[in-house]
Image (cartoon, rainbow, N blue to C red):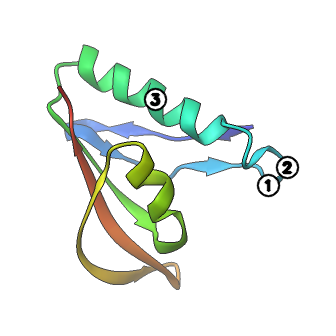
Amino acid sequence: MGCTRLCPGGRLGRMAVLPRWRGQGVGRALLEHVVELARRLGLSRLEADAQVRALGFYRRLGFQVCGPEFLDARIPHRRVWRELD
């Protein structure tokens, strides 16, 4: 249905959800799981490069947007981050 990676230092690798599963909470469940995993590992912050079209998704899950827009694989992205409590 979907996948993501938690890289060293609290960096999220690519996150992907199969088209037929989008909008059904799969991405939210993945990201919430990674947040909990990062907390258990003692990380204080998560960062990711998010597609511009997905910024609302990340904002709803507590991420802040920072930095300028840039292209990754010819797709507009922005850096997002979230402090973990």
Does residue 16 lie above or below 7 as drawn?
Answer: below
Does residue 34 lie above or below 73 as drawn?
Answer: above
In the drawing, does residue 51 fall left or right of residue 29? Answer: left
Task: Name the N-terminal-most of marks 3 and 2.
Answer: 2
Q: Secondary structure at mark 3?
A: helix
Q: Which residue ends up furthest to the front in the rendered image?
A: 60
Q: Secondary structure at mark 1?
A: helix
For disc 3, the marked residue is 32
> Residue 11: horizontal and vertical position, in percent?
29, 46
Q: For the residues labelled 1 and 2, say whether their Cβ atoms are less than 8 Å apart.
A: yes
User: How many C-alpha atoms fall within 10 Å of the one at disc 3: few (<14), some, or many (≥20)?
Assistant: few
Q: For the residues labelled 1 and 3, say whether their Cβ atoms are less than 8 Å apart.
A: no
Q: Residue type at mark 3?
A: Glu
For disc 1, the marked residue is 19
User: How many C-alpha atoms fall within 10 Å of the one at disc 1: few (<14), some, or many (≥20)?
Assistant: few
> Residue 13: horizontal and vertical position, in percent?
42, 49
> Residue 85: horizontal and vertical position, in percent?
17, 25
Distance from disc 1 to disc 3, alpha carbons, whole Å, reads 20 Å
Q: Quadrant of residue 64?
A: bottom left
